[in-house]
C-alpha cells in the first residue's frame, strides 16, 4: 500500500528549507559585507551591500602593488601584508608541529604508561590551561626579555620566542589525544610486541597510523590558534617587518582614520590559507573531532 504524505507535512518541509536558506544567508552575510567593502572605492565601512562602483585598489595594496590615487600620484602599499601573512604562516606551522609532537608523546605516556602522580599531573595541566594567557603577559615579557640577553634569537622580537610561547598551551591537546589512544585496543601493541617490536616501534608503526584523524584535528586547532592569537604576539613582536597578521592588522585602524577597505581585502586574503587547510584536512576532521570523546 503506497504511503500517503499528509498535506501539512509538505508545508513543514517547505518551512524547514526556508529556515535553512535564511540561516545560510545570515551566516554568509558578514563575508559578503567584507567582500563588498573591499571592492568599494574609498575606505568606508558604511554603504549598500552591492557597491555602486567596483575597484581593485584595496586588493592591489594588500598584495603589495602600488595604485594610482585620486590626485594622479602613485600610492605605495601602506603595510607589508604579504610579509605579515608569511610570518603568521611560519609561526603557525612550526608551533603547530611542535605542539603536535609534544602532545602526542605526552598523551601516549598518560594513556599507556603507569607512573606516580599521573592523575595529579593531568588535573594540573587541565587546571593551568583554564587561565587565559593574557594574565601572564607580564611574566612572558620578562622571561623572554631575560632569555634574549643570553640567546638573542630566542628573545624579544623573534618568531622563535613566539613559537616557544605557543608550544606551552598543549593541555587540551594532550587530553584529546589521550582519549583517542585509550579507545584503541591494547592488544594491537601486544601483538606487535610478540612480533618483536619495541614500544617505540609499536607507537610509530601501529598507534600513529591509526591516530591520523585526531592528529589532523590537533594540528588544525593549533595552527588556527597561532594564526589568530593577538596578546602574546603584540607583546613579543615590535618591528613592523616581524609582525604577524593578527598584530599588524591593528595598524589599519588609526585613531583619526580607519582604512576599512584595505583592512577588508587583507582579511579575505588572510582567510585563504585557513580555507585551503580545512579543505585539505576535512576528510580527517569529521572522524577526528569526536574520536577523543570515546574515553578519557
Image (cartoon, rainbow, N blue to C red):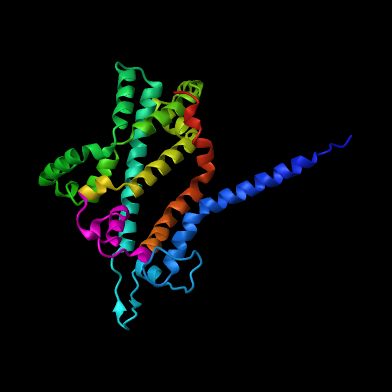
- Residue 35 in the image, given as x and y percentages of width and height: 46, 62
Location of residue 103 with respect to 230 vertically, above or below: above
Residue occupying image coordinates x 44% and y 68%: 39
The foreground one among 220 and 246 is 246
Q: Quadrant of the C terminus?
A: top left
The foreground one among 178 and 136 is 136
How many numbered marks appear? Answer: 0
Considering every residue shown, the one lying at the far left of the view is: 149
Q: Quadrant of the N terminus?
A: top right
Q: Is residue 4 magenta?
A: no
On screen, residue 256 versus residue 32, left or right, reads left
Location of residue 104 with respect to 39 vertically, above or below: above
- Residue 279 in the image, given as x and y percentages of width and height: 51, 50
Which of the 4 image quadrants contains residue 245?
bottom left
Instruction: Mark yes or no: residue 142 visible.
Output: yes
Residue occupying image coordinates x 17% and y 47%: 155
The foreground one among 210 and 61 is 61
Residue occupying image coordinates x 45% and y 34%: 208
Instruction: Mark yes or no: residue 192 visible.
Output: no
Which of the 4 image quadrants contains residue 103?
top left
The foreground one among 268 and 106 is 268
Which of the 4 image quadrants contains residue 248?
bottom left
- Residue 12 in the image, given as x and y percentages of width and height: 71, 42
Which residues, given as a range, are shown in magenta? 236-262
Amino acid at each position: 500500500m503506497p504511503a500517503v504524505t499528509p498535506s501539512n507535512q509538505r508545508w513543514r518541509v517547505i518551512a524547514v528549507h526556508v529556515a535553512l536558506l535564511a540561516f545560510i544567508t545570515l551566516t554568509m552575510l558578514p563575508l559578503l559585507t567584507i567582500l563588498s567593502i573591499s571592492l568599494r572605492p574609498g575606505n568606508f565601512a558604511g554603504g549598500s551591500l552591492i557597491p555602486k562602483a567596483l575597484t581593485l585598489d584595496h586588493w592591489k595594496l594588500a598584495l603589495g602593488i602600488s595604485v594610482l590615487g585620486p590626485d594622479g600620484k602613485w600610492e605605495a602599499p601602506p603595510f607589508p601584508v604579504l610579509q605579515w601573512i608569511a610570518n603568521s604562516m611560519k609561526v603557525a606551522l612550526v608551533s603547530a608541529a611542535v605542539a603536535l609532537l609534544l602532545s602526542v608523546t605526552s598523551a601516549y605516556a598518560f594513556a599507556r604508561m603507569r607512573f606516580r602522580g599521573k592523575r595529579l599531573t593531568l588535573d594540573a595541566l587541565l587546571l593551568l590551561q583554564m587561565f587565559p594567557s593574557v594574565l601572564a603577559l607580564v611574566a612572558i615579557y620578562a622571561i623572554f626579555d631575560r632569555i634574549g640577553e643570553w640567546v638573542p634569537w630566542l628573545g624579544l622580537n623573534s618568531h622563535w620566542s613566539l613559537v616557544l610561547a605557543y608550544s606551552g598551551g598543549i593541555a587540551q591537546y594532550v587530553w584529546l589525544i589521550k582519549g583517542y589512544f585509550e579507545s584503541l585496543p591494547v592488544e594491537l601493541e601486544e601483538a606487535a610486541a610478540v612480533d618483536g617490536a619495541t614500544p617505540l616501534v609499536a607507537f610509530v608503526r601501529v598507534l600513529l597510523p591509526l591516530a591520523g584523524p585526531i592528529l589532523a584535528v590537533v594540528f588544525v586547532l593549533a595552527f588556527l590558534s597561532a594564526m589568530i592569537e593577538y596578546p602574546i604576539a603584540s607583546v613579543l613582536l615590535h618591528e613592523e617587518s616581524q609582525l604577524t597578521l593578527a598584530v599588524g592588522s591593528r595598524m589599519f585602524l588609526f585613531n583619526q582614520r580607519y582604512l576599512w577597505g584595505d583592512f577588508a581585502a587583507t582579511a579575505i586574503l588572510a582567510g585563504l590559507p585557513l580555507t585551503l587547510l580545512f579543505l585539505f584536512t576535512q576528510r580527517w576532521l569529521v572522524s577526528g573531532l569526536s574520536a577523543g570523546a570515546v574515553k578519557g
